[in-house]
Image (spheres, rainbow, N blue to C red):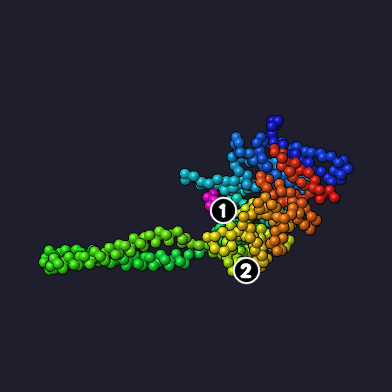
Amino acid sequence: MKGNSLLIILGMFFIPIYLLNGQVNSKVLNLEQNASIQEVGETKNFISIRTGRSEPNRKYSAFVLDKTGNKLLEKTGEDNRFMVQAEAVEPLNYFIVVQQGYEGYEGTPGKDDLIQAFDIKTGNEVWQTHANALRYSVSPDGKYMITQSDVTMSGPSGSKFTIMNLQNGTTVSHTLKLRSWFAEWLDNDRIVIALQQIKKNPDTKNYYENLAKKEKERNTLMDSLIHQRMRLSIELKMRKVSQQEYDDKIAENNQKYDELNKQKAEAVRIKNLHQQKPAMMLDASKLMIYNIQTSQIELEKEINAPDGSPMLLRSSSDGGLLTISVEPSTQTIYFCARKGNPNVASSCLTKLNKSLSVTMVTPIAGMKLNKLKVDDEIFFIAEKKGIQYVMDKNTGRLYQTNKISTKQGEITVETDIIKQPMPIKNYLRNLNIQQKNNSVEFSIRKEAQQ
């Protein structure tokens, strides 16, 4: 490797060695020139790292390491093909890598994302398949994966909802046909799906129906006046009416015609203003719980805030927070939504129980909200005007602190952890991560040393 290659310094140690020797032993991982860390994830025994570079050509790589910093597996993606995800699935000892497909052009069909599973021990590919997997979620037991994408994707499968068996990459059959949706696992067998419902705007619907009726009546009257003019002209030539009678009737005709023309112009003006109102409007989001073992929808419910206002699906979220998140141990659902009038965005975090009843709504407008997962617990970290807050999940209140209390004890949340360009999929409990220029340094946490 060239001397100017990017270095990731991994100072990972067994705690006894660190305490006895009082010094840091480091391991060095050489990466492609101009590469940068894009994501770090952790399981019980593995750390996964996804990297990428933009110049001179885009190139992406993914690595699996053990907790002592030894590189177990490295996979490099195709040139100029974005690597969407790279994640170690520990129950199967698999490393799942997703590479972005592409949209069709000039009559050429698009290509779905490439999903590959590699055996971490041997490095061999176990299976590969294609699906639209801009986002995906692995079940808690590591047996299944749901793939999901934006509805705008134009690959062969579009926004098709897919459930995949991670053992062999085959698709699990289902009859769900979804549009504008997000999904997450509730447990090993059940999936929570958030759907954005759409309905016709009743005001717009009635307006256009009345507009069409009045326009038809007005056109009929104007046609009648034109025919009356033609008839009067013929009668004048045949001397059935006098010049005076003709002039009087034509004047009356013109007055009525001009009035109808004014009504028509005013109707066009109002129509142009009214067209700013959408013919379709967003309705309350619907959440459902689907069981993949029974292929049945167990529960389905529209989501409204306690004050009755509809909760609307967010297509994107601040700080990388997914629209729907689940805490498996408590089966608590967190739904990042918009509250109230669909034309006035009011971001909020909604907490629901497994019966899909809303138990808390916390406004988050103007905040950058991040989700940290520690083992089976979820914590929310908010940042506003450079100040960091931790959200109390029971009350929704924000506290200015960098400490979170977990089942295993208190953890300090470093600000660098929750900022780009290195998002953390799962919080690294025993390792402190600091990104410094072109290196990432791993060290034992203070909490872990005690």
Q: What x and y, as percent, mark residue 436? A: 72, 40
Q: Based on the displayed image, in which of its 4 quarters is residue 262 positioned?
A: bottom left
State the extent of the magenta-drawn residues as a range. Answer: 149-159
99 vs 91, left or right, is left
Compared to residue 389, the image places residue 352 above or below, namely below
Q: Is 151 within the magenta?
A: yes
- Residue 75: image x %, image y %? 68, 41
At 57% from the left and 46% from the top, the residue drawn is 101
Q: Amino acid at mark 1?
A: Asp
Q: Which residue is mark 2?
A: 306
Q: Say the numbered circle drawn on residue 150.
A: 1
- Classify 214 as above or below 21: below
Above or below, comparing residue 119 to residue 374 in the picture: above
Question: Left of 8 or right of it: where is 264?
Answer: left
Q: 424 left or right of 105? A: right
Instruction: Find out whether the residues at labels 1 and 2 contact each other: C-beta distance under 8 Å.
Output: no
Other residues around mark 1 within 10 Å, as few (<14) / some (14–19) / many (≥20)? some
Look at label 2 and name its amino acid: Pro
At x 74% / y 49%, what residue is drawn? 414
Mark 1 and mark 2: Cα distance apart in space: 29 Å
Residue at horizontal 58%, vertical 53%?
149
Mostly what secondary structure, the magenta segment?
loop
Spot occupied by residue 140 in the image (x, y as percentages of width and height):
71, 56
Task: Judge the density around disc 2: few (<14), some (14-19), many (≥20) Cα neighbours within 10 Å.
Answer: few
